[in-house]
Image: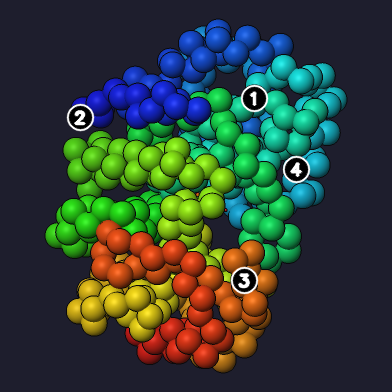
Amino acid sequence: MKNLSNRIITINRTPIFFGNDSLPSIDKLVARIRPDGIFILVDPNTMKYCLPLLMEKTESLATAKVILTNDGERAKSLQQAEKIWNELLISGAGRSSLLINLGGGVISDLGGFVAAGYHRGISYINVPTTLMAQADAAIGGKTAVNLGHLKNQVGFFYPAKAVVIFPGFLQTLPLEHKRSGIAEIIKCALIGNAALWKRLQKNPVIRLLDMPVECALWQKLILATATFKNRVVVKDYREQKIRKSLNFGHTAGHAFEGFSQMGITEPLLHGDAVAAGMICAAYLSHRKTGLSRSDLESIASYINDGFGRLPIDPLTKPQLMDIMMHDKKTHAGRLLFTLISKPGVPVLNVACGADEISEAIDYQCRLFT
Ligand SMILES: NC(=O)c1ccc[n+]([C@@H]2O[C@H](COP(=O)([O-])OP(=O)(O)OC[C@H]3O[C@@H](n4cnc5c(N)ncnc54)[C@H](O)[C@@H]3O)[C@@H](O)[C@H]2O)c1
């Protein structure tokens, strides 16, 4: 594959290796960590599409034990975590064992959670295989599982020993998951990189989806987003200040996602839900933090054109509001949103009341009808 440079994004708390030749860096990491056992967490797709390549490009993983978990958001549960803990235990994993999370955001969130809890914390390395995970989820040490349809209710800040990003894994990623990952790229542009937002506007989602992952633009988009995320995390690991900007679109998005998993509509992919959530957040930004009408409209139409109709129905508003009010970011009965004042400039902790949120959902519904 051409054009994929080999880079180390950071050597901070968690080194991040990026590029076409990044996988062998795992051997050096293993030599440094010197684990007494190595385990690789996969789902059925990453076992089929990614594990053979990982094994081919590394030597130190030859005797690793592979642990298979379920595919998709439902795997992010306490039950799955317990199953994996039991497998680790039965296989003799100890305090010095190493877990390699080979997969998308579900695997890195779940595997990180498992690593944080097992024997009060074992080492883990994230090897992200989806766009969502390469650009965002695998970076930053936030681990979690869901409780029922409430997203990420139990989790830890627990940093990986390293993140190894090999963009070539994306070649087998289904289109809908590629599109879902684009949502986090849009988010990073809107909260912190106006130049990236301009570049995205010249490249509609549909065109991006048509481009092969080995093209230079894709490489730049992943690198820019992963680097941005890492910079934010390094500044504010515990999410006291600027890291909250990464929640742009997630307050409403998590409610859309959680609601869709109750079985009334088709389950939404995380990125699709965040895309819809960003339209709500852009509407609230227009209402409360000075985002211009034309910026609101260009954000809404860019997302709407790229992500198409989402199953958001005015009739489901009460349930959506109910899920949202369970969000971790409430204060005195009002929800705290990350908004923007213009593309690239976040505004944190903006308290929004139920009436304003309800208006934002109405705006969203009008767009999608
Ligand atoms: N911790 C964080 O900071 C953070 C940030 C953003 C998102 N997330 C979480 O990430 C999750 C979503 O992640 P996701 O979108 O990667 O979903 P995912 O992990 O479910 O992966 C999507 C699908 O792609 C398949 N897949 C993975 N790699 C593949 C490959 N290379 N080829 C073919 N198929 C492949 C998976 O099996 C799955 O079916 C959500 O749970 C979200 O909450 C976490």
Q: Check mark 2 vs ligand 1: CB closer than 8 Å? yes or no.
A: no
Q: CA distance from mark 4 to mark 3?
A: 28 Å
| 56 left or right, relative to 291 | right
Q: Residues within 10 Å of mark 1 (few under 14, many from 20)?
A: many
Q: Secondary structure at mark 2?
A: loop
Asked if labels 2 and 1 touch by Cβ distance under 8 angstroms, the answer is no
Which quadrant holds the N terminus? top left
Q: Residues within 10 Å of mark 2 (few under 14, many from 20)?
A: some
Which comes before the other along the chain, label 3 or label 1?
1
Mark closer to the chain start, 4 or 3: 4
**Which badge, 1 or 2, comes first in the chain's sequence?**
2
Q: State whether label 1 is within 8 Å of ligand 1.
A: no
**Where residue 49 appears, x then y in whole percent?**
48, 34
Q: Which mark is residue 3?
A: 2
**Residue tagged 4:** 81
Q: Which disc is residue 123 wearing?
A: 1
Based on the displayed image, in which of its 4 quarters is residue 212 positioned?
top left
Q: Which mark is residue 209?
A: none
Seen from the viewer's position, the closer of residues 227 and 65 is 227
Residue picked out by circle 3: 330
Q: Are marks 3 and 2 in contact (CB under 8 Å)?
A: no
Amino acid type of the residue that numbered disc 4 sits on in the rendered structure: Ala
- Give the quarter of the image for residue 199: bottom left
| Residue lying at 64% horizontally and 79% vertically, measured from the top left | 333
- Numbered disc 1: secondary structure: strand
Does residue 48 appear in this view?
Answer: no
